[in-house]
Amino acid sequence: MAFGIKRKELVNWKEKVTKGKIAFLTHYWQDPRFPGCYSVTKVGCSDIDKLIDWGKNYNLKEEWIDLKESFPHFDLFGDKQKEVLMNEGKWSHIHKFNL
């Protein structure tokens, strides 16, 4: 279940992903498989090769890309989420979600 984002944020993320840009979307999230994680960052890009290359910078494996939706993306949470957001300068995500 996702919450804590506005429709405009989601629409903007989808537009960037569709245009082949690396795009970030962070929202609150709960999943019993990941106790203690209360937010997720989706890093998407419709250019799969570009997304794979980007992920290599953070030791993210190609097989971790979520292809089930029309918007290919990595799901980041926990320590990896914060590491990536810091390295990418996404301070607004870090502050908004108290990471």
Image (tube, rainbow, N blue to C red):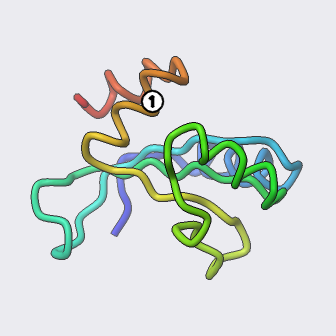
Residue beneath the point at 67% across and 42% down: 54
The reply, left or right, for residue 66 in relation to residue 30 is right
Foreground residue among 6 and 73: 73
x and y percentages locating residue 63 in the rendered image = 57, 72
Q: Examine the rendered structure and indicate whether residue 16 appears above or below residue 89.
A: below
Q: Quadrant of the N terminus?
A: bottom left
Residue farthest along the right direction in this orientation: 19
Q: Examine the rendered structure and indicate whether residue 35 appears above or below residue 91.
A: below
Q: Which residue is mark 1?
A: 85
Residue farthest along the bottom direction in this orientation: 68
Quadrant position of residue 67: bottom right
Secondary structure state at the residue bearing disc 1: helix
Q: Quadrant of the C terminus?
A: top left
Q: Examine the rendered structure and indicate whether residue 70 appears above or below residue 17.
A: below
Residue beneath the point at 53% across and 45% down: 25
Going by the numbered disc 1, the residue's amino acid type is Leu
x and y percentages locating residue 37 in the rendered image = 19, 54
Q: Examine the rendered structure and indicate whether residue 3 appears above or below residue 84.
A: below
x and y percentages locating residue 52 in the rendered image = 69, 54
The reply, left or right, for residue 4 in relation to residue 60 is left
The reply, left or right, for residue 66 in relation to residue 47 is left
Q: Residues within 10 Å of mark 1 (few under 14, many from 20)?
A: some
Foreground residue among 8 and 21: 21
